[in-house]
Image (tube, rainbow, N blue to C red):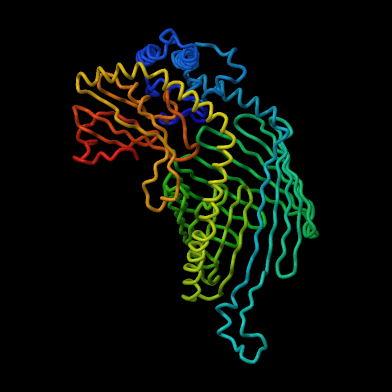
């Protein structure tokens, strides 16, 4: 489990760093200075009005809680990684306080594992594949034949010539034992069959596991198998799989052994030896990085020997777009494949691959991954190398995808996002209302301090916050029908001015005193109009961006450009 990065807030509503307006790397001295300054601003004894005094006590207690957590190295390490939920987990009372953040992270993961084990019996891991083979060769090859005298020959015939369905579920029995039940059904050109398998897997140690497999089908007899995995070193492992297949022709044994080694951080090397019906020796190198995936393989075997090279480029975009290409040359002929895949929703990935081969012809393979389910549609277009088939196999899916994305996928995702946002707003409505009331109370508490700060800044011609708004701004003309959702944060920002400077850290500004989130789940910004040395300046800052003002040249407004709010 990874630690929270330096620019992320912990997974809770309260961001203690934002509340104290300090960096996540702040030293103890910085924490203490920020805490003391805020205590001076919000101390309950400064207010005689009972209601203001009560509100000041609430804010003061929250500041005190934030400082207590962040000033203690152990609780700060827990909070940095797991937020308030980590502090609330049972079991920390037995942890030694001298432990380092890395040791605390390991201890938290141990406690998490114990919780997962208690819920183990309720978990399964279903996986499924549906493959539908389509024969569409009549679209292209039919023109080489004489159809004129055949009734109904004006329409090409597209047929489903094969299907395959497989499904598996995992049933954890104990913390180390798992049962896997799987089955499959296949049919091709009117003939088919199926099988069912049961595997029992046991994790024997941190270095390995073993698996027993039992299977039976209507086309073949019983199957008994044994699979063993073992880490030989930190960079090397071996897998051995032996099987006995019983049939009317007798017992057919098989054995597969794979030896793998980490060549570097991103590269794996594999050696495979397979003995049985299709004996072969295979060696491959796989390099996987954040931006690409490369595979090179060479096999000597009966009946097939081949050499294969493939490359996949990973675009660093929101849709996780990938383009790929491969070349495979062997005794069976030559196959060139190219394609792309893209994420179309939160749990769905759509891909298309064009396969051009000799003597295989041209095929289009469409694949949809939906969570743990895979839907595969191989479409055989022609047995020949026809440029027209290659063209339509390449352009057709692209045109269909662009049309679907514009007319179906994008509107659906937009509606789904709005629906999710509405649900989130409804579930957090009471919390948002409470945060709003707390922010308004904090603003009332700041009034006297802000008055003194403004007087001091005016005397030195320093930093005066003229107007400030926080929330959702709509500047794009294509989104002008959307509603602007902002709150006035002029007073809270002026309260943070010290010595004619305002510094905000890289954290969501919704956690600052006097702020709250006016548009939960939506992109927010901070817009500030300020005066420094008698000159007006304006700046717009992203929600999680650091902000330092004044910056006289970067923020200075042209003469006469002050137009007021929004």
Rendering coords of residue 503 (x, y %): 31, 25
> In which image quadrant can residue 189 be found?
bottom right
Nearer to me, 204 or 367: 367
Q: Is residue 156 left or right of residue 13?
A: right
> In which image quadrant can residue 24 be found?
top left
Residue 74 in view (yes/no): no
**Which residue is at a point 25% across and 25% down the rendered structure image?**
463
Nearer to me, 534 or 152: 534
Rendering coords of residue 166 (x, y %): 70, 54
Point out the residue furthest to the front here.
49
Q: How many marks?
A: 0
Rendering coords of residue 517 (x, y %): 47, 32
**Which residue is at a point 61% across and 26% down the rendered structure image?**
112
**Which residue is at a point 72% across and 31% down the rendered structure image?**
174
* Quadrant in which the C terminus is drawn: top left
Q: Is residue 315 left or right of residue 163?
A: left
Rendering coords of residue 141 (x, y %): 56, 80
Residue 406 vertical position relative to residue 345 in the rendered view, above or below: below
Residue 29 in view (yes/no): yes
Nearer to me, 404 or 286: 404
């Amino acid at each position: 489990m990874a630690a929270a990065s330096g620019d992320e807030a912990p997974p809770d509503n309260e961001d203690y760093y934002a509340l104290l307006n300090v960096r996540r790397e702040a030293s103890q001295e910085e924490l203490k200075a920020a805490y003391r300054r805020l205590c001076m601003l919000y101390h309950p004894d400064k207010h005689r009005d009972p209601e203001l005094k009560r509100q000041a006590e609430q804010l003061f207690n929250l500041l005190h809680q934030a400082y207590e957590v962040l000033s203690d190295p152990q609780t700060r390490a827990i909070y940095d990684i797991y937020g308030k939920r980590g502090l609330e987990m049972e079991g920390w009372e037995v942890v030694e306080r001298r432990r380092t953040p890395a040791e605390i992270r390991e201890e938290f993961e141990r406690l998490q594992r114990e919780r997962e084990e208690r819920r183990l019996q309720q978990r399964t891991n279903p996986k499924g594949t549906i493959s539908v083979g389509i024969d569409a060769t009549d679209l292209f090859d039919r023109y080489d034949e004489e159809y004129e005298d055949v009734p109904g020959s004006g329409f090409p015939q597209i047929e489903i010539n094969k299907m395959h369905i497989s499904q598996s579920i995992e049933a954890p029995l104990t913390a180390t034992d798992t049962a896997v039940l799987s089955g499959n059904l296949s049919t091709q050109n009117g003939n088919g069959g199926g099988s069912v398998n049961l595997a029992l897997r046991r994790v024997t140690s941190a270095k390995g596991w073993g698996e027993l497999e039992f299977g039976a089908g209507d086309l073949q007899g019983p199957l008994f198998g044994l699979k063993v995995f073992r880490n030989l070193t930190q960079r090397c492992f071996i897998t051995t799989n032996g099987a006995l297949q019983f049939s009317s022709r007798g017992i057919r044994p098989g054995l597969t052994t794979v030896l793998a080694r980490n060549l570097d951080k991103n590269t794996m090397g594999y050696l495979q030896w397979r003995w049985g019906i299709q004996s072969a020796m295979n060696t491959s190198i796989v390099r996987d990085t954040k931006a690409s995936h490369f595979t090179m393989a060479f096999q000597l075997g009966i009946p097939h020997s081949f050499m294969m090279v493939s490359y996949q480029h990973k675009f660093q975009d929101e849709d996780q777009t990938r383009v790929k290409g491969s070349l495979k040359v062997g005794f069976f002929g030559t196959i060139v494949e190219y394609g792309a895949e893209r994420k179309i929703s939160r749990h769905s990935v759509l891909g298309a691959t064009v396969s051009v081969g000799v003597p295989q012809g041209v095929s289009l393979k469409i694949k949809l991954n939906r969570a743990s389910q895979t839907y595969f549609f191989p479409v055989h277009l022609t047995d020949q190398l026809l440029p027209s088939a290659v063209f339509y196999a390449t352009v057709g899916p692209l045109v269909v995808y662009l049309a679907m994305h514009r007319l179906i996928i994008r509107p659906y995702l937009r509606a789904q996002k709005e629906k999710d946002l509405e649900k989130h707003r409804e579930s957090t409505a009471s919390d948002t209302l409470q945060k709003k009331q707390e922010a308004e109370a904090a603003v009332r508490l700041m009034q006297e301090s802000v008055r003194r700060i403004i007087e001091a800044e005016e005397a030195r011609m320093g930093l005066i916050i003229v107007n400030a708004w926080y929330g959702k701004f709509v500047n794009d003309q294509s989104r002008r029908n959307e509603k602007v959702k902002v709150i006035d944060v002029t007073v809270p920002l002026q309260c943070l001015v010290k010595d004619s400077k305002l510094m905000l850290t890289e954290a969501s500004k919704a956690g600052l005193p006097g702020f709250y989130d006016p548009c939960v789940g939506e992109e927010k910004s901070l817009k500030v109009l300020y005066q420094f040395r008698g000159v007006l300046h304006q700046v717009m800052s992203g929600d999680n961006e650091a902000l330092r003002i004044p910056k006289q040249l970067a923020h200075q407004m042209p003469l006469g450009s002050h137009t007021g709010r929004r």
